[in-house]
Amino acid sequence: MKNHKMYEADDKMISLIADNYNILQSLGRFGLNLGFGDKTVREVCEDQNVDTYTFLAVVNFSINGHRDLDDGDRFSIPTLLHYLKSSHEFYLNFQLPFIRKKLESALDENDNLARLIMKLYDEYAHEIRHHMQYEEKTVFPYVDDLLNNKVNSEYDIETFSKHHGQVDLKLKELKNIIIKYLPSDAQHNNQLIATLYDIYNSEEWLHQHSMVEDSIFIPAIRKLEEKYKQNDVSVKISKMISQNPDSNETLSDREKDVIVSLVQGMTNKEIADHLCISINTVITHRRNIARKLQIHSPAGLTIYAIVNNLVDISAVKL
């Protein structure tokens, strides 16, 4: 049953753990060490260089399913990345081998059904390892590039989201087979029950990990992409214009005024009235602008105005 309490930065960390002992694993994934006394969540996080808002967002989501994504800009992407990478390391290097060892001890190595169960577990382990290594080699480096203002036009977080499916079907199949069909003597029964308990916990952890990626990580990266997409467009177009020798011809102040007016959506007559000139003069200015810049479309002039700081990109609908 979920604990519906919302934990805040001024709550005692020890109280949070006392209410939800399974959060102990999250402490390790964030890089938080024990021995923090009666300090608040904020104090513990600040002392150990962990973003408090991001820590609480993951913790509250894990405990009660609360998703506060209205202010996604407050998430620390490096903190999220550290949490996810550490979670992968824990599951691949500790949890998977730990369960396999316990399962092996609980089964009779001479039993054919037991050997098939071990094979099924190894297939599951291979599948989950492949899934997490894809994130390590493709998704996380992509996010690191975004943080360093490098935009990969051939990949986005939506590509990852579409292929981020279930990877625990074999685990469900494994535990059902053990429960339904695997006979055991008294000696192995307790071992099997203990191992099954670990498998159930592992299944719950994996589901929670996947939900954090779907509900917190992916939306946060979408916001990051939106932030840098506009900057990347400006940089690319600026380079394109700077490579055009015709763009070096200087525009007059009046011609710049005409461009700004065009970007704002004014007609020739409205520009004439706004600048107190004749329509014929506006047309002449537009011809000169097109000749100098080799740009003839309103969209092209809008881009030129943005990259040359004639208008603010935030005021332009791209």
Image: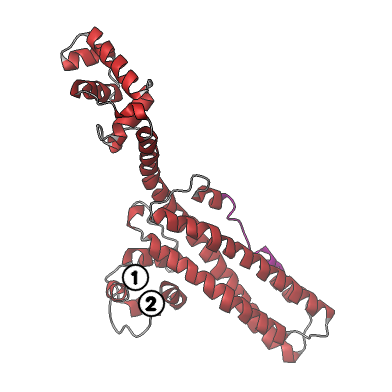
Residue sitting at the far left? 276
Identify which residue is drawn at 47% across, 54% down: 218
Label disc, if present, on residue 23 of the rendered structure: none
Residue 279: x and y in percent read 24, 9
Image: 60 above or below 288:
below
Label disc, if present, on residue 32 of the rendered structure: 2
Q: How many marks?
A: 2
Separation of residues labelled 1 and 2 (CA atoms) = 8 Å
Answer yes or no: is residue 197 visible.
no
Q: Is residue 164 magenta?
A: yes
Identify which residue is drawn at 34% across, 53% down: 73
Identify which residue is drawn at 44% across, 64% down: 81
Disc 2 marks which amino acid?
Answer: Leu
Please tell me how crowded label 1 is: few (under 14), some (14-19), or many (20+) other residues with Cα within 10 Å: many
Q: Quadrant of residue 6?
A: bottom left
Residue 80: x and y in percent read 42, 63
List the residue tagged with mark 1. Answer: 50
Horizontally, residue 113 falls left or right of residue 282, namely: right
For this rendering, which residue is in front, 135 or 69? Answer: 135
Secondary structure, mark 2, is loop
For this rendering, which residue is in front, 284 or 169? Answer: 284
Residue 167: x and y in percent read 63, 62
Secondary structure, mark 1, is loop
- Start-end of magenta stretch: 162-173
Q: Quadrant of residue 284?
A: top left
Disc 1 marks which amino acid?
Answer: Val
Q: Are marks 1 and 2 in contact (CB under 8 Å)?
A: yes
Horizontally, residue 206 falls left or right of residue 34, namely: right
Image: 107 above or below 275:
below
Please tell me how crowded label 2 is: few (under 14), some (14-19), or many (20+) other residues with Cα within 10 Å: some
Identify which residue is drawn at 30% across, 20% down: 289
Answer yes or no: is residue 275 visible.
yes
